Image (spheres, coloured by chain):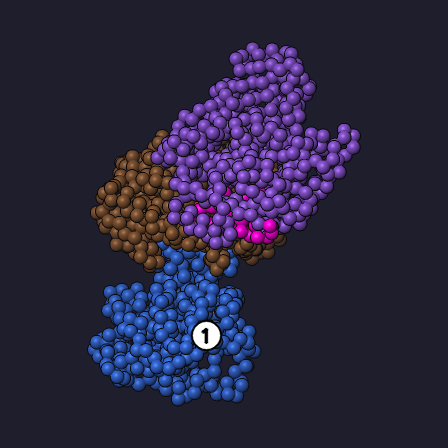
Chain colours: A brown, B blue, C purple
Amino acid sequence: MSRGHAALIERLARVVGSSHCLSSPAELFAYECDALTLDAVRPVAVVLPEDAEQVSRLVGVCGELGHPFVPRGAGTGLSGGAHPVEGAVVIGCSRMRRILEVDAENRLAVVQPGVVNADLSAAVAHLGLCYAPDPSSQQACTIGGNIAENSGGPHTLKYGTTTNHVLGLELVLPDGERVRLGSKSGFAAGYDLVGAVVGSEGTLGIVTEATVRLVPLPEGVETLLAVFPDLQSACRLVGRVIGAGMIPASLEIIDQRTIAAVEASAYAAGLPLDAGAVLLIELDGAACGLADQVASIREFAASEGVRELRVARDEDERALFWRARKGSFGAMGRLAPDIYVHDAVVPRSKLPDVLERICQIADRYQLQLSNVFHAGDGNLHPIISFDRRSDEELGRVVAAGREILELCVAAGGVLTGEHGVGVEKRDYMGLIFSAADLAAMTHLRDAFNPTGICNPGKLLPVTRSCVESGSKARARVSPG
Amino acid sequence: MAAPRPLERNVYTQTLDCIHCGLCLSACPTYVVTGRESASPRGRVYLMRGVAEGEIELDPVVASELQLCLGCRACESACPSGVAYGAMLERARESVVDAGLRRGPARWLERWALRHIVPHRRRLHALASLLAVLQRLRLDRLVFRLPLESLRRAGSLLPAVPGRLDRRPLPAFSAAEGERRGRVALFEGCIASELFAAINHATLRVLTRNGFDVVVPRGQTCCGALQAHSGDLSFARKLARENLVAFSARDTAAVDALVVNSAGCGAALRELEQWLPGEGAAVAAKVRDVCEFLDEVGLRPPPHRVAARVCYDDPCHLIHAQGIAAAPRRLLACIEGLELVSHAEPDSCCGAAGTYNLTQPDMSRRILDAKITALEAAAPDIVATGNPGCLLQLQAGFDERELPIRVLHPVELLEAAYR
Amino acid sequence: MTDRLSSSVRDVLRQELAGTLRGHEPPLEVAGSRLDLTIAPDSGAELATTLAVLTRESVPVLVRGGGNRLALGNPCRGAQVLLCCRGLVGVDELDAADGVMHAAAGTPLGELSRQARHAGWELPLDPPGENATLGGALATAIGGPRRLGFGPTRDCVLGLEVVLASGERTRCGGRVVKNVTGYDLAKLYVGSLGTLGVIEAAWLRLHPAPRLRLVRVAQFDAAERAFTLALEAARRPSASAVAVVSAGLAERAPELRELHCRPGSWMLVCEFAGDAAVCGADRDWLARAGGAQEAREESVTALRELQTDAAPGGLRARLHALPSSLEAIARHLRAAGAELLVYPIPGVVYASFAPREPAGRDHRAAWFDAALAALEEAKRFAAAEFVLEELPDSRRAECDVFGAAGGSLGLMRALKRRFDPQGLLNPGRFVGGV
């Protein structure tokens, strides 16, 4: 136990019980980062409350003893939103995993924040319903974490992101007060505080209960895989589809570098290695409307020079198509100990140009990079494989990352489409926002979190207008 | 040069395969129960890495988080990066033992039993006979007075020992019935061959009924999985070598497959290469789970009806370690009258996990409770599962709640349909 | 704060904001305020200067777009200047490939719709009011009949440019369709009735223009049947607008009157839009369920104006409730004498009560108290929330039209304090006097 924090730990343990208050070096070590491994800080304690009352009391203890606290879901975030700061207490929601109510008639569910995204969909599937936002980590990530990050996923093109699916919240404010925002009907008089809290990266309080919308499972689904000789024509097909007024459930592009990595891994899906890009199209909705759409896409694809267009015949083939898409992060992960996933968004029409230049940047920095992305949204995910044990390599990763972001911003884009700003991109906020813009954002944070005790150091630059420093990784000593 | 840190030589490189994405978390039974990152696969890999890098000590907390792992390997199914978690865990546990972090009478007894009773067929047979006598005299209840929790739990798990006739050794050779389709070797197992003697006999009969000659090579022994999971890798390697010799003998090497009816043993034998690098590959390549094998060659339609509602529950070492989920279900669906009903999370661990239910009784109990609740909701007559540990654990769970549900190996149901 | 603008301040404003300013003598009486001046900037920079000067001089303002919904909200307390945003006009970008557009806040929605349609897209906003502006539509965030297909107002807002009370020009969001860069301040501004800042321009996400629109109506004597079918219809894949209207209200719109609604019955109006095959399937489904009467598209747009229809001197409320409770609410309010327009999804009821007796200056109208009591009763038994949209001026002073804001009022006040420390933007108009 860290000796200086004995009093804190004793007070916290009194709230949750000693078995749910972690303070040994090994236990704390496991909480020093989330899925972003560029940076790491060990917390002084980790507490695992089971209800809102306990969260409120824990927050009170932190406030009283002057310790910042950091909310955490499953720690699958890619921007470091759940990274502790010096002296922080991590409040984990992993034990608050009950589905409190399912109202099939009104198509909504009330859940605790630790409910796993995919578990909610599984629990309502027998009612013909699902929870629509489906981040790629849905098998593990929690609804609370999704709310903090306003998570998206491959199907947001049609169904929207988390913010479109949250009706009401219970929030423990940084001073320990519990407030209810929104309502089951989605309406609440006054400012749209639910809208403000969703995507606030856990800096406005801790969500202890959420009322979320459920949507009907689609009647029909068609999944198509279009193989193109080059990335440009794949992007053009995306433009044609969108331009024709179709809203597919997803439009995902896998570039040649990713295909190579995936096909060399356990996730090989039989994609041709000489293809310039593969476009995965999923259409869903009323079954009677799908045939026409498939026919139009066939026609567009042919005129854009598609090499091969496969339509999944059954669930197995559909799963095979998605295999390469879903396996791409893991496949890139096998190339080196760490991966760094970017998340910039650019206007769809700028995709081909921006992608080409991103690859040039990676080549210049001699980094292994691949692109697999939500083309329909213009949401890029350049993945860099690297080894954080080499400071020199890490430096190149950070420098290339910055160039990639600058490039995307110059193209009219933004820093992040679904992963959040966190610690990773907070110092790049000045690339797109002025001091006045950031001051307005600070007004919001300060209205909820005036003392800054709640998840400090995230989302907003630590000192205004600083664009100087990128993320700094803790130097690690490699053995041997 | 300084001495290597613990885990540095044997585990470290593999820990780097983990990209820390966290997709394994919700698949991990101990994480689901505790909510602790350090009790999750990602957390444990991170602890191993931290120890190897010198960031943290290999201390009792690290040891206990590693011990708390069931080794169910559900995380491997969830992992996008193909992290070889099971293999890392075995090695890390060996280091925990080497570091003197597992001591005490329970540990001593476990190690002694795994080394000196379990792999010895005659000693096991004698012990089973003694137990049978005790059970007949109702003296087995005395076990509940013993000072060790793990022994008390063991006592509560034990089924009635089958009669001496059932526990007779399997014939060295049994001829195929009907048109001959091939020749297979059968792996007998250790404790199961006594306590679940009927399963081995059923396996033999189902294989011969399906047209296969069956040889049971002498000299085979325990697969070593239990020893490896408990951190006794060196002894596991010794057993593996004995098996390698037994199954490499000339007459045995020629078989179409080495059929195993215990998921745990099958997983261990499939990974023989890991324990005996460069040697085990040939034998490992022949290993087939009995359901997988029958499904592959095509089951001869069983002639009789078995009217029962059956839930199939996936043994972790079959679904996660060997990737087999559809085959047993397909086989059961071939039995006329048998109604296959689904239940929630059939792929989650039951908490048996080798000796886990003895060494971690509390956690095992909590995991079992969830499993029994899920199965009870489906209201089956029979639960089918292909691993001895799961058979014991689930039956004990049903008996405790006084539920009239029997737990059987899928081959026992197949055999009934051929009888 | 004095009631009237002092002549010295007036002079300062005239001096610094020449060209966009017009005096009123006697003062203009709007939404509870007596306004001495109208300032109408015609660029974002002018808007910024205006607000900076007004803040420096501590002059409270009433912000106006199209002027349709000035009755919405509580009376504006003590505003002295009317800030008219209709001069900020123009679409400076419409990306037909991406389906996004950037427009100034004073641009009329009709103009935006026209341009969107021209490019093959549809503007997903249809609030009531003929000359509604973009800024006004966003600040009030009140949907129309096609809210079902369009989604809530906030969903089409990708980014905003907002001038804060201090005169600082700020941006949030952006032009891309998916964005979590920074706090989602646009959510706060949308629906804030101009109390946090003045919207200067917005990036909007357009919807694909539907290939086909089909309108069908049906009449039911039993509320149960009407509401059950309405909810089912609203959940059909191509449903773009679904409403249930009480006969008395339907009579008030010529486009619906021509469909001959039986007295005492309920009229169900359904619009299906999009893909021809899907619309056709939904139309056939409705026909089988008893809704085969064809109608013009205008019967849907007519609903929009019925939302703001009210008898002179009457009371109109907007209730929000769960879809499953709408039938009970409708029966209850109908029994209390209200005419109703109901959108089953997202669960909105417009209830309008006509005055039943002459309201004397000094005696309280019993009908009003009864109507209010009926609304309160609905709130209680159906967990509904309601906002009074129209009520006799004599009653405005005595109630908060938004009802009680509950536990989150403290947060709202804190927000207001930080965005508009002097409380100059639309003072008192919003929830709890914010």
Place residue A444 in its image quadrant. top right
- What residue is shown at x 39% (from left), y 28% (from top)? C93
**Residue occupying image coordinates x 59% and y 45%:** C262
What is the x, y in percent for residue C399? 70, 35
Q: Position of residue B321 (x, y in %)?
A: 36, 64
Q: Quadrant of residue B199?
A: bottom left
Q: Which residue is mark 1?
A: B309
Instruction: Give the residue type that dot 1 points to.
Output: Arg
Residue in the image at 50% along x and 86% along y: B134
What is the total number of numbered labels drawn onto the structure image?
1
The boundaries of the magenta stretch are: C221-246
- Is residue A449 in view? no
Depth check, front residue: A108 or A142: A108
- Residue A424 in the image: state x and y as whole percent: 42, 39
Asked which secondary structure carries label 1, the reply is strand
Q: What quarter of the picture does the N terminus of chain C occupy? A: top right
Q: Position of residue C118 (x, y in %)?
A: 38, 31
* Quarter in which the C terminus of chain C is drawn: top right
Determine whether, in the image, residue C189 is placed left or right of residue B412. right
Dot 1 falls on which chain?
B
With respect to residue B22, does B181 lie above or below?
A: below
Q: Residue furthest right?
A: C362
Is B114 or C338 nearer to us in this picture?
Answer: C338
Residue C224 is one of the magenta-drawn residues? yes
Q: Nearer the viewer, residue A154 or B274?
A: A154
